Amino acid sequence: MSSTTTSQDLKFDGRALINGKRVDSRDGQLFDCISPVDGRVLTQVARCGAADIDAAVAAARAAFEDRRWSGMAPAQRKRVMIRFADLIQKHGDELAMTETLDMGKPVKYARGVDVNSAANCIRWYGEAVDKVYDEIAPTPSTALALITREPVGVVGVIVPWNYPMIMAAWKIAPALASGNSVVLKPSEKSPLTALRLADLALEAGIPEGVFNVVTGYGPEAGSPLALHMDVDCIAFTGSTRVGKQIHVMAGQSNLKRAWTELGGKSPNIVFADCPNLDKAVEAAVGSIFFNQGESCNAPSRLFVQDSIKERFLEKALALVPGYAPANPTLPGTVMGAIVDQIQMKSVLGYIESGKAEGARLIAGGEQVMAETGGCYVQPTIFDGVKPEMKISREEIFGPVLSVLSFSDAAEAVRLANDSVYGLQAGVWTSDINKAHGVARALRAGTVHVNQYDEDDITVPFGGFKQSGVGRDKSLHAFDKYTETKTTWIRIDSPV
Ligand code: NAD
C-alpha cells in the first residue's frame, strides 16, 4: 500500500495463525475489534481458548523438535529475519494505518516510530545472530569446557496494546533469531498487526509452526499459555497486576522461565540549574502526552525545584494546546484516541480523584470529541500534587501529568524513589556531580540526563522493583531466550 493508505482501503483478517495457516478458533467464537477512533467495528477476531493454545504450542514444539528453524545455520536465519524486516517496511503504510485504527495512536507516529522500530529490531537481532560467539572456559589443559547457548524451545509471548508491534518485536526478534519457536498472544484490544506480522514472517521464509499468533482475552488465551506444561519460557509485557500472576502461573506449572516488563510511574526531576529550561519543558510535556500518555516509561511524576516551578509551569501551559486530540488517521495529528472506553473511563476516574484529593487542575481534564464515537481525553496537568495522592502513586496510563515540588537533591531522590515502580527516571541539571550522584541514587532501569527521549535497540530496557524482571533489547535479551550449557571434554593428551 502507498503512503496514501486510508482507513477505508483496509480489509482485516481476524483469524488466528497456527502452524502456518489462518484458522478460526476451535469453537468458532469471535469478538468484535472496535476502533477507538470512531467506535466502529473493524472486524471480528478469533476468540481463542485453551484448545487453540494447545494446537499452537503443539505446532511450535513440533517445529522446534524437527529443527526446521533451530537447526538452520545462524547466517541462514539471519537472511530470513532481514527479509522479514524488509517486508515490514514494504507494508509499513498498511501496518501503520491498521495500528492507528486498532488502538488510536496518530498514524504519523505509527509509521514513523512503531513500524520503523519493529522492523529495525527484527533486522538488528537477525544481523546479530551470526556474530555472537560462545565461550571456552579457562580450565586446566587436561580438559576442555565449552559453554554454549542453546534456544530454550517454545517461547510464549504476551503483549499489551500501547505499542503492539514494538512490544511484540522486542520479544519475538531475539527469540526467533536464537532458534526458538514462538506462540504470541497480542492484546485483545489491538490484535490486528500481530496477525499481519505473522503473515509477513511466513512470506519471508520463517517455516510453518515456528511463529504462531493466537488471539483472545487474557484469562481465556493468555493464562493457558502461561500455564502450559510444554512452554519453556513466557515473556510478558503488561500491567504489574497481571505480571505477578504470570510469575505465579510459571511456578504453578512447569517452572518455565518468566520475564516481565511491567508498569511505571517514572519521576522526572528538574533542578533550578537545568541547562536549558525550554528543552526541559518540551521534554516533560512531550513525553507524557506522546502516545496519549499510554507509555510505560512516560515521566508521569514531574518534580520541579521550588524556585523555578512557576516559570516552568507557565512555559508548560503554553505548549498544551499543541497537543489537542484529533482524528489520528489524519497526517498532522499528534494526540490521538485512548485505546478504548474502559481505559478512557479509568483515566477520567483518575482525573476525578486528583480533583477530589485537592490537586490543582491547571490544564485539560475533560473528555472531548464524544460525538465521533471515539475515545478522546484532553492533555491534563495537575499542580500541587502530594506524594500520597492516588495520581502520584498509581499508573494512570493516560495523558495526565502530576507536578510536585522539592527543595534539594536529597528530597528529590527520596520522593522519586518512593514508588513501587522503577522503570525510568529523568534528571535535569548543569552540575555534573549532581547529575551522576542523583542518577546513581535513582532506583530505575534507565536514567535520562538532560533529555528524556534517547533510545536505541542497542541498550537494555526494563525495570527495577515492581516494573518487572529481565530486560528487553540489546544483546542482553538473548539471555532470556537461550539456555547456557556446559560440555566437559577430557583430553588425554599424547604429548
Ligand atoms: P494487561 O496486563 O491488562 O494486559 C497485557 C496482556 O496480558 C494482554 O495481552 C492481556 O490480554 C494479557 N492478560 C490479561 N490478563 C491475563 C491473565 N490473567 N493471564 C494471562 N494474560 C493476561 O496490560 P495492558 O492494559 O494491556 O497494558 C498496559 C500495561 O502494560 C501498563 O501497566 C504498562 O505500563 C505496561 N507496559 C509495560 C512496558 C514495559 O516495557 N515495562 C511496555 C508497555 C506496556
Image (tube, grey):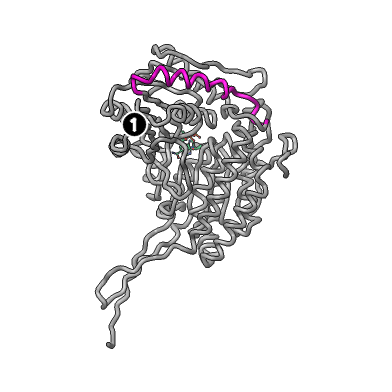
Residue behind mark 1: 420
Number of callouts: 1
Q: Is residue 244 visible?
A: no
User: Is 393 above or below relative to 69?
Assistant: above
> Residue 46, image x and y in percent?
63, 40
Give the image quarter of residue 322.
Answer: top right
In-front residue for pair 234/99: 99
Locate the N terminus and report the quarter of the image it occupies.
top right
Query: Image point 60% across, 40% down: which residue?
Result: 112
Q: Residues within 10 Å of mark 1 (few under 14, many from 20)?
A: some
Q: Is mark 1 within 8 Å of ligand 1?
A: no
* Residue 404 left/right relative to 401: left
**Nearer to the camera, 393 or 410:** 410
- Relative depth, front residue between 450 and 6: 450
Q: Amino acid at mark 1?
A: Val
Q: Is residue 438 magenta?
A: no
Name the magenta segment's main secondary structure. helix
Residue 315 highlighted magenta (yes or no): yes
Tag 1's secondary structure? loop
- Residue furthest out toward the right: 9
Q: Is residue 138 visible?
A: yes
* Quadrant of the snapshot with the C terminus: bottom left
Q: Is residue 456 left or right of residue 467?
A: right
Relative to 423, say whether 343 is above or below: above
Instruction: State the extent of the magenta-drawn residues as a range.
Output: 305-330
